[in-house]
């Protein structure tokens, strides 16, 4: 798992974090989507990256681990139960993965790449752009974002206890058209690339220097609900009809 950064080899640990206790869509990480388990789309996108030769899966679930490995990933450890609840902070699972892999392999990684299973429409290029932006700037973490469907300066509101509504964020000046409002973006789960020290030392994504890679909305669908799953399935089927099923990639020997 090595990339080039500033003329030196950068040790990259790439992981998919997938717990077994999904409530919105039970069993979603191994649910079939257009002929492949959901997690397989993340593993295959990772293995298609120019900078990733192995994809690790952090999970508490044997079924998820087995399915991921069948599609080219590795599952050298299990995530502790306390890090796999729906209230556990994701950054703690990130830290556990780094610490565990460094102990198992007696090495030190420079970068953690997180490729969640819930955004199956990503492309390998999206992952590469995150890694490249991280290595070419002073960013602590690179996130992915997409143009927001709603704008808090224009068509989002808050309501008080009396039912009185007002614009969510007061715009600078009079905004009468969406085009006049400041640009806003939605954070997506397409990919994250973070420096090791920021993962180990910072308490939130936005505690350090953050940059973003923009991705099209059709690649940014994040599956949290059954409706999200149906939308992802529709968009994936449309892509496959146009481009065909991508070949199955395997981890490097």
Image (cartoon, rainbow, N blue to C red):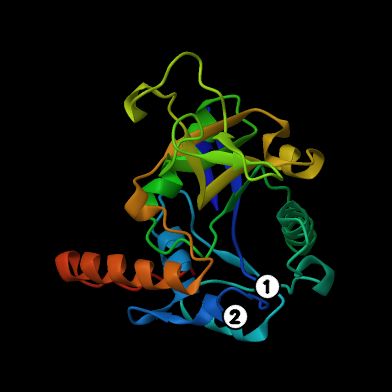
Q: Earlier in the sequence, mark 2 or mark 1?
A: 1
| Residue at image location 60% in from the left, 31% down from the top | 210
* Residue that protrudes farthest toward the front in the picture: 162
Question: Label 1 crowding class (10 Å Cα cut-off): few <14, some 14-19, many 20+?
Answer: many
| Residue at image location 68% in from the left, 35% down from the top | 206
Q: CA distance from mark 2 to mark 1?
A: 7 Å
244 sits to left or right of 137: left
**Considering only vertical position in the picture, is 30 above or below 153?**
below
Report which residue position mark 1 lands on.
59
State the image coordinates of residue 213 (x, y, percent, origin top left).
45, 37
Report which residue position mark 2 lands on.
64
75 sits to left or right of 71: right
Question: Label 2 crowding class (10 Å Cα cut-off): few <14, some 14-19, many 20+?
Answer: many
User: Relative to the observer, which residue lies in front, 173 or 25?
Assistant: 173
**In the structure shown, which secondary structural element does the residue marked by tag 1 occupy?**
loop
State the image coordinates of residue 11 (x, y, percent, origin top left).
61, 46
| Residue at image location 54% in from the left, 63% down from the top | 55
**Considering only vertical position in the picture, is 122 above or below 214?**
below
User: Relative to the observer, which residue lies in front, 8 or 60?
Assistant: 60
State the image coordinates of residue 177 (x, y, percent, origin top left).
33, 26
> In the picture, residue 105 is in which quadrant?
bottom right
State the image coordinates of residue 168 (x, y, percent, origin top left).
57, 34
User: Relative to the observer, which residue lies in front, 116 or 50?
Assistant: 116
């Amino acid at each position: 798992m090595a990339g080039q950064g500033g003329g030196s080899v950068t040790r990259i640990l790439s992981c998919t974090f997938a717990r077994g206790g999904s409530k919105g869509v039970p069993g979603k990480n191994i649910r079939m989507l257009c002929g492949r388990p959901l997690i397989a789309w993340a593993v295959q996108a990772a293995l298609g990256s120019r900078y990733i030769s192995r994809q690790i899966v952090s999970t508490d679930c044997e079924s998820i681990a087995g399915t991921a490995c069948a599609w080219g990933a590795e599952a050298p450890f299990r995530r502790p139960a306390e890090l796999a609840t729906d209230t556990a902070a994701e950054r703690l699972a990130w830290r556990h993965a780094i610490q565990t892999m460094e102990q198992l392999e007696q090495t030190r990684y420079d970068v953690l790449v997180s490729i969640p299973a819930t955004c199956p429409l990503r492309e390998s290029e999206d992952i590469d752009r995150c890694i490249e932006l991280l290595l070419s700037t002073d960013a602590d973490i690179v996130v992915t974002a997409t143009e927001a469907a709603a704008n808090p300066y224009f068509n989002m509101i808050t309501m008080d206890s009396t039912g009185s509504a007002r614009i969510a964020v007061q715009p600078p000046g009079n905004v009468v058209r969406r085009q006049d409002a400041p640009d806003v973006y939605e954070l997506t789960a397409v990919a994250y690339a973070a420096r090791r020290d920021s993962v180990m030392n910072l308490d939130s994504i936005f505690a350090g220097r953050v940059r973003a890679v923009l991705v099209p909305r059709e690649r940014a669908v994040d599956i949290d609900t059954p409706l999200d799953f149906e939308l992802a399935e529709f968009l994936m089927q449309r892509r496959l009809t146009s481009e065909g099923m991508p070949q199955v990639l395997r981890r490097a020997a």
